[in-house]
Amino acid sequence: MMAFNQKVFRPYDIRGVVDREIDGSFAFAFGFALGQFIKNKKKSGKINMLIGHDARLRSPALSDILINGLSESSKDISVIDMQLCTTPMHFYILNKENFDGGVMVTASHNPKEYVGFKVYGESGEPITLKSGLLQILGLMNKAPQFDLKHHIDDGDVWKKKDYLKEYTDFLFKGVFKLLNPCSIVIDAGNGTAGIVVEQLARRLGLGLIPLFFKPDGNFPNRSPNPLDPMSLEPLRDRIKKTGADFGVAFDGDGDRVVFVDENSKIIEAEQIFAILAKEALRERPGAPIVVPVNISKIVRETVSHSNGKLIVSPVGRTFLIEAMRRQEAAFGGEISGHYYFQEFFGGDAGIFALIKVLKIFSRSQKSFSKLFDGLDKFYKSPEMNITVGDLAGIIWDLKRNYSEAHLVEEIDGLTVEYSDWWFNIRPSNTEPVVRLIVEANTKELLEEKTTELKSFIEKKKGTTQAKP
């Protein structure tokens, strides 16, 4: 019996170093176990699964092997293979076509040596550690021995299908005419976003200045993580040289996007969130807007002033999708550059966010930077990683120490809010640390309260560092 590495099973998905932690044997056993898991849930009838993969070097092969495992698990399973696609494209088709489940083979923004699986069940519900990944791990030991020579190629079981036209037709349904012709530098980062963005430029008549559009799993030009400031240097440099109106950078699988203005200044995700929330409420007045506990006060103020219904969620993609669906929310977002839309079955979509921002920009007749006037009035710390021995004890002590605050919530960790500053401390979903974030009305108050909180926590034998 082969022992599989439990470490790669994260709260929301599976990620690990290729070959060392996730190899062909793992992919085959996982596909077999997922098939058994879905079959046990459905009880009877045919099972239709949707598989797609990103541009990483081993993703196509691991996708094929996973499909073989699925096919081996039950004669009732048929598979549609989307092949190379973005994560939002896979999620959209999975939901629109009512598949029984699916897997996107991707490690998202992780370095090139990583691979991973984002896993879904019926109605496109993410399968998480709590909702099924641990059960699937248990079933993997029942998989037959993986044999590279054993390859299913039955047209009735495994079909390849290109959904790019169907997906782009949806993206550009009701295509608008740009009132303000513009040029945009778009950095696909050698990920999968470029295959869709080309359609965007053609249909909208954009003055597209492309960067790194060719999918290449070596990511030779920059990290697949656009939140790394060094990753944005080629984009910022190209904006300066071309005089473009603005620029965007996508991560490796196209679900995360970062915006840069005409002055090569990086726009904070929360400022993008604020204008998109306002747009969503213009289109659907009074609608719920989902925000995570670590979002800036500027977003909460914008939603409130636009007469939206604020829904506070724990941090993380799965929680945001669940809240979007449960509340039938119009829009949601995170500080990591993920933006969630009702039109996307509650899922996140980087290119759709770009289209929405383009509409706002075109209608405004302003320079891009002017869209965010007044949205930088608060001062916020980066998220700080803190290693602690007793999180529950520290949260208890913090609650007592700041008991006079006008808001104390425990939706995800602890949020404490005063009229002129607030903080949130929560356990990380992906690392053995907690995250601390602080925001205040002035720079001086931010520095004072950050020092105060770090000192308080460190007295409990914690150590702090800024999140990389």
Image (tube, helix red, strand yellow):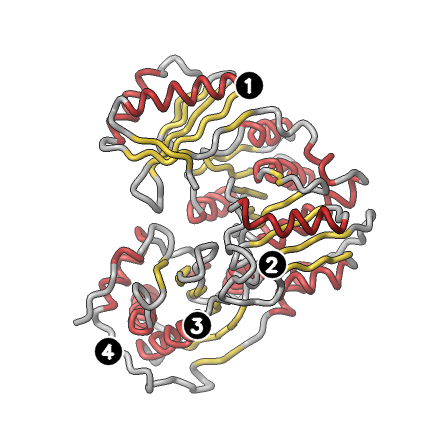
Q: SS for tag 1?
A: loop
Across and down, in percent, residue 22 comes to 32, 66
Calculate the distance from the C-alpha at mark 1 to the C-alpha at mark 2.
36 Å
First in residue order: circle 1 vs circle 2: 2
Calculate the distance from the C-alpha at mark 2 to the C-alpha at mark 3.
31 Å
From the viewer's perspective, tell me whether residue 176 is left or right of residue 314: right
Determine which of the numbered discs, if any, sits on residue 188 in the image.
2
Query: Label 4 sits on what residue type?
Result: Pro
Query: Label 2 sits on what residue type?
Result: Ala
* Residue visible at 42% across and 23% down in the picture: 450
Query: Label 3 sits on what residue type?
Result: Asn
Q: Residues within 10 Å of mark 3 (few under 14, many from 20)?
A: some
Question: Mark 2 touching mark 3, by CB under 8 A?
Answer: no
Q: Residues within 10 Å of mark 1 (few under 14, many from 20)?
A: some
Image quarter where the N terminus lies is: bottom left
Across and down, in percent, residue 200 comes to 70, 60
Q: Residues within 10 Å of mark 2 (few under 14, many from 20)?
A: many
* Residue visible at 56% across and 67% down in the picture: 215
Q: Which residue is mark 3?
A: 48
